[in-house]
Image (tube, rainbow, N blue to C red):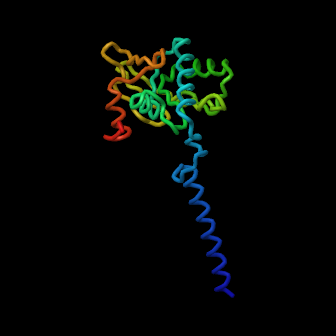
Amino acid sequence: MMKELFKKISIIILINMFISILTILIKYNIINNKESFYAGTYQSKDKLNYTLLETVKILNANKITNWFIGYGTLLGIIRGNSCIEGDDDIDIICNKDDYQRIKDIFTSKKFNISMQHPGRFLQIKGNSKYSQVDFYMCDVDKKGNFKDNWEHVLWSNCYRDNNKLIEYKWKDNILYLPNNYKTKLKNIYGDKWII
Protein backbone atom coordinates (compact mmCIF):
# COMPACT_ATOMS: atom_id res chain seq x y z
CA MET A 1 0.00 0.00 0.00
CA MET A 2 2.81 2.45 0.88
CA LYS A 3 4.60 1.50 -2.31
CA GLU A 4 1.52 2.31 -4.39
CA LEU A 5 1.02 5.67 -2.61
CA PHE A 6 4.67 6.56 -3.13
CA LYS A 7 4.33 5.75 -6.84
CA LYS A 8 1.26 8.03 -7.22
CA ILE A 9 2.96 10.91 -5.38
CA SER A 10 6.07 10.50 -7.55
CA ILE A 11 3.97 10.69 -10.73
CA ILE A 12 2.19 13.84 -9.51
CA ILE A 13 5.53 15.49 -8.66
CA LEU A 14 6.96 14.61 -12.09
CA ILE A 15 3.89 16.01 -13.88
CA ASN A 16 4.10 19.28 -11.90
CA MET A 17 7.82 19.58 -12.66
CA PHE A 18 7.16 19.03 -16.37
CA ILE A 19 4.43 21.71 -16.42
CA SER A 20 6.68 24.17 -14.54
CA ILE A 21 9.60 23.64 -16.93
CA LEU A 22 7.34 23.94 -19.98
CA THR A 23 5.87 27.20 -18.63
CA ILE A 24 9.36 28.67 -18.13
CA LEU A 25 10.47 27.60 -21.62
CA ILE A 26 7.45 29.27 -23.22
CA LYS A 27 7.65 32.43 -21.08
CA TYR A 28 11.28 33.07 -21.93
CA ASN A 29 10.79 32.14 -25.59
CA ILE A 30 13.15 29.18 -25.42
CA ILE A 31 10.49 27.21 -27.25
CA ASN A 32 9.63 28.93 -30.54
CA ASN A 33 6.38 30.50 -29.44
CA LYS A 34 5.50 33.27 -31.91
CA GLU A 35 2.93 34.74 -29.55
CA SER A 36 5.20 34.94 -26.51
CA PHE A 37 5.67 38.03 -24.37
CA TYR A 38 8.97 38.90 -26.01
CA ALA A 39 8.12 38.31 -29.67
CA GLY A 40 5.25 39.26 -31.89
CA THR A 41 3.97 37.54 -34.97
CA TYR A 42 6.04 37.31 -38.13
CA GLN A 43 5.35 40.13 -40.58
CA SER A 44 5.88 40.67 -44.30
CA LYS A 45 8.68 43.04 -45.25
CA ASP A 46 6.13 45.20 -47.11
CA LYS A 47 4.07 45.73 -43.96
CA LEU A 48 7.23 46.34 -41.90
CA ASN A 49 8.55 48.84 -44.47
CA TYR A 50 5.20 50.64 -44.53
CA THR A 51 5.16 50.81 -40.73
CA LEU A 52 8.74 52.10 -40.59
CA LEU A 53 7.99 54.72 -43.23
CA GLU A 54 4.89 55.98 -41.41
CA THR A 55 6.73 55.99 -38.05
CA VAL A 56 9.61 57.97 -39.54
CA LYS A 57 7.22 60.49 -41.11
CA ILE A 58 5.51 61.05 -37.75
CA LEU A 59 8.79 61.44 -35.83
CA ASN A 60 10.30 63.77 -38.43
CA ALA A 61 7.12 65.89 -38.78
CA ASN A 62 7.18 66.43 -35.02
CA LYS A 63 10.89 67.36 -35.04
CA ILE A 64 11.96 64.38 -32.95
CA THR A 65 15.48 63.73 -34.24
CA ASN A 66 17.47 62.08 -31.43
CA TRP A 67 16.58 58.51 -32.44
CA PHE A 68 17.89 55.83 -34.75
CA ILE A 69 16.83 52.44 -36.04
CA GLY A 70 18.29 49.53 -34.12
CA TYR A 71 18.45 45.76 -33.76
CA GLY A 72 16.69 43.84 -36.59
CA THR A 73 15.42 47.00 -38.28
CA LEU A 74 18.97 48.38 -38.59
CA LEU A 75 20.20 44.99 -39.79
CA GLY A 76 17.59 44.83 -42.55
CA ILE A 77 18.01 48.39 -43.79
CA ILE A 78 21.81 48.15 -43.95
CA ARG A 79 21.88 44.63 -45.37
CA GLY A 80 19.12 44.96 -47.94
CA ASN A 81 17.67 48.51 -47.80
CA SER A 82 14.48 46.91 -46.46
CA CYS A 83 13.06 45.47 -43.29
CA ILE A 84 13.60 41.73 -43.01
CA GLU A 85 10.86 39.39 -44.23
CA GLY A 86 9.52 37.55 -41.18
CA ASP A 87 10.75 40.05 -38.57
CA ASP A 88 8.11 40.83 -35.97
CA ASP A 89 8.50 44.56 -35.29
CA ILE A 90 10.21 47.89 -35.93
CA ASP A 91 12.98 48.80 -33.47
CA ILE A 92 13.65 52.45 -32.65
CA ILE A 93 16.34 53.56 -30.19
CA CYS A 94 15.57 56.99 -28.75
CA ASN A 95 16.24 59.48 -26.02
CA LYS A 96 14.10 58.83 -22.94
CA ASP A 97 13.50 62.59 -22.72
CA ASP A 98 11.21 62.19 -25.75
CA TYR A 99 9.14 59.40 -24.14
CA GLN A 100 6.07 61.49 -23.26
CA ARG A 101 6.06 63.39 -26.57
CA ILE A 102 6.28 60.16 -28.57
CA LYS A 103 3.51 58.58 -26.49
CA ASP A 104 1.26 61.64 -26.83
CA ILE A 105 1.85 61.99 -30.58
CA PHE A 106 1.12 58.37 -31.41
CA THR A 107 -1.88 58.28 -29.06
CA SER A 108 -3.31 61.40 -30.74
CA LYS A 109 -2.97 59.63 -34.09
CA LYS A 110 -5.08 56.74 -32.72
CA PHE A 111 -2.25 54.22 -32.42
CA ASN A 112 -2.76 51.70 -29.63
CA ILE A 113 -0.07 51.74 -26.94
CA SER A 114 0.20 48.11 -25.85
CA MET A 115 3.04 48.28 -23.34
CA GLN A 116 4.62 51.19 -21.54
CA HIS A 117 7.37 51.53 -19.02
CA PRO A 118 8.13 55.27 -18.71
CA GLY A 119 11.77 56.04 -19.39
CA ARG A 120 12.44 52.44 -20.46
CA PHE A 121 10.15 51.14 -23.20
CA LEU A 122 7.12 52.06 -25.28
CA GLN A 123 5.38 49.61 -27.59
CA ILE A 124 2.84 50.46 -30.23
CA LYS A 125 0.58 47.55 -30.99
CA GLY A 126 0.40 46.20 -34.50
CA ASN A 127 -2.86 45.74 -36.36
CA SER A 128 -4.02 44.79 -39.85
CA LYS A 129 -2.37 47.91 -41.29
CA TYR A 130 0.76 48.36 -39.15
CA SER A 131 3.37 46.13 -37.57
CA GLN A 132 4.34 46.53 -33.92
CA VAL A 133 6.82 49.35 -33.12
CA ASP A 134 9.16 49.09 -30.13
CA PHE A 135 10.72 52.29 -28.80
CA TYR A 136 13.75 51.53 -26.62
CA MET A 137 14.25 54.50 -24.29
CA CYS A 138 17.82 55.47 -23.52
CA ASP A 139 19.86 57.69 -21.28
CA VAL A 140 21.92 59.76 -23.74
CA ASP A 141 25.09 61.66 -22.91
CA LYS A 142 26.93 64.37 -24.86
CA LYS A 143 29.28 61.84 -26.45
CA GLY A 144 26.35 60.09 -28.07
CA ASN A 145 26.27 57.05 -25.82
CA PHE A 146 22.72 55.65 -25.82
CA LYS A 147 22.18 53.35 -22.83
CA ASP A 148 19.13 51.23 -23.61
CA ASN A 149 17.14 51.07 -20.37
CA TRP A 150 15.09 48.07 -21.52
CA GLU A 151 17.59 45.66 -23.08
CA HIS A 152 20.51 47.12 -21.08
CA VAL A 153 22.59 47.52 -24.23
CA LEU A 154 25.05 50.40 -24.58
CA TRP A 155 25.09 51.89 -28.05
CA SER A 156 28.36 53.80 -27.72
CA ASN A 157 29.62 56.83 -29.67
CA CYS A 158 26.52 57.09 -31.85
CA TYR A 159 27.18 60.69 -32.86
CA ARG A 160 29.52 61.70 -35.64
CA ASP A 161 32.09 64.46 -35.15
CA ASN A 162 29.36 67.07 -35.56
CA ASN A 163 27.45 65.61 -32.56
CA LYS A 164 24.71 64.29 -34.82
CA LEU A 165 23.47 60.90 -35.91
CA ILE A 166 23.95 59.75 -39.50
CA GLU A 167 21.14 60.85 -41.79
CA TYR A 168 20.21 58.05 -44.19
CA LYS A 169 17.83 58.82 -47.04
CA TRP A 170 15.28 56.02 -47.38
CA LYS A 171 12.12 56.20 -49.50
CA ASP A 172 12.44 60.02 -49.70
CA ASN A 173 12.60 60.32 -45.91
CA ILE A 174 15.40 60.59 -43.37
CA LEU A 175 16.20 57.63 -41.13
CA TYR A 176 18.82 58.10 -38.45
CA LEU A 177 21.64 55.60 -38.00
CA PRO A 178 24.25 55.35 -35.23
CA ASN A 179 27.86 56.13 -36.04
CA ASN A 180 29.90 52.98 -36.83
CA TYR A 181 26.68 51.05 -37.45
CA LYS A 182 28.53 48.21 -39.20
CA THR A 183 30.67 47.62 -36.10
CA LYS A 184 27.55 47.73 -33.94
CA LEU A 185 25.81 45.15 -36.16
CA LYS A 186 28.88 42.92 -35.99
CA ASN A 187 28.89 43.20 -32.17
CA ILE A 188 25.20 42.22 -31.99
CA TYR A 189 24.92 39.61 -34.77
CA GLY A 190 28.49 38.36 -35.22
CA ASP A 191 31.00 38.41 -38.05
CA LYS A 192 28.51 37.08 -40.59
CA TRP A 193 25.86 39.75 -40.00
CA ILE A 194 26.09 40.89 -43.62
CA ILE A 195 24.78 37.54 -44.91
In this view of the protein, which residue sits in the foreground, 81 or 63? 81
Q: Residue at x 43, y 20 (%)?
A: 176
Residue 131 image point, x, y percent: 59, 31
Residue 89 image point, x, y percent: 54, 34
In this view of the protein, which residue sits in the foreground, 93 or 50? 50
Q: Is 134 placed above or below 62 here?
A: below
In this view of the protein, which residue sits in the foreground, 89 or 14? 89
| Image quadrant containing the C terminus | top left
Q: Residue at x 42, y 35 (%)?
A: 153
Quarter residue 181 falls in: top left
| Image quadrant containing the N terminus | bottom right
Residue positioned most to the bottom: 1
Residue 120 image point, x, y percent: 53, 30
Counting labels gives 0
Q: Residue at x 63, y 32 (%)?
A: 125
Q: Residue at x 64, y 33 (%)?
A: 114
Residue 113 image point, x, y percent: 64, 29
